[in-house]
Amino acid sequence: MVTTHDLNVSRRGFLKLTAVSATLVATPPLVAKASAPAAVRPPVMQKVAFEVNGKETSLTLDTRTTLLDALREHMQLTGTKKGCDHGQCGACTVLLDGRRINSCLTLAVMHPGAKITTIEGLGTPDKLHPLQAAFVKHDGYQCGYCTPGQICSAVGALDEIKRDIPSHVTADITSKASFSAPELRERMSGNICRCGAYSNIVEAVSEYAGAKA
């Protein structure tokens, strides 16, 4: 057994050495050389062509670009809104080949040759779509952020009823579909209005549909 006498170290010195040794053991050694960062893979670019609001459009995009970002960032069609970016609020709803879709949940390159309609393609400030005019009349806009998605969704919902596509509240799926407030609320339940203007929205869509809620 080695003693402090053998090492010619005083008791106080020995305690100091013990404390320093314990610190070195407990502390991980410093990294002598930082590891080189992993190489960043360049984005994969792909050309995609589709029709947007009646105009043929061709874009070269990162394959990870959502349809929403392609519309907003690459085509400056900012009427389509980015809300939750998780497909839960409906603010990004557009019509793709006539059907409603959450544009934040799909990649632009997945839809070559598609016909896409945004709120800009439904009407203009000088020539409003009848449904846009109905929203103004019934104050369905409120803050207006969700309105583009609400209107596109309503157009799609009414088209589903016209094509006899049933919903979860359709009582008889074998009979002809008909418009009603419960049908509209169910079909548009994925569109959130944080202002709470739901009754105004139902009134606006009902007027456009030629029905009373």
Image (cartoon, rainbow, N blue to C red):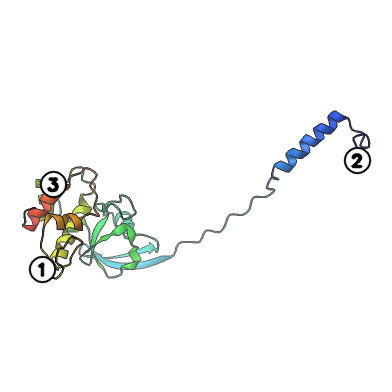
Secondary structure beneath dot 2 equals loop
Q: Residue at x 74, y 41 (%)?
A: 24
Where residue 94 sits in the image (x, y, percent)? 24, 59
Check residue 2 in the rendering and tell me which mark sits there, or answer none: 2
Label 1 vs 2, first from the N-terminus: 2
Q: Is residue 41 above or below residue 21?
A: below
Label 3 – label 1 distance at C-alpha: 27 Å
Where residue 131 sits in the image (x, y, percent)? 12, 54
Q: Is residue 110 above or below residue 40?
A: below
Regarding residue 44, the answer to whether it shows in the image is yes
Q: Quadrant of residue 51?
A: bottom left
Instruction: Using the image as rendered, state which of residue 71 and residue 148 is in the foreground.
Output: 148
Residue position for label 1: 176
What amino acid is at disc 3? Asn
Residue position for label 3: 200
Give the mark toward the camera: 3 or 1.
1
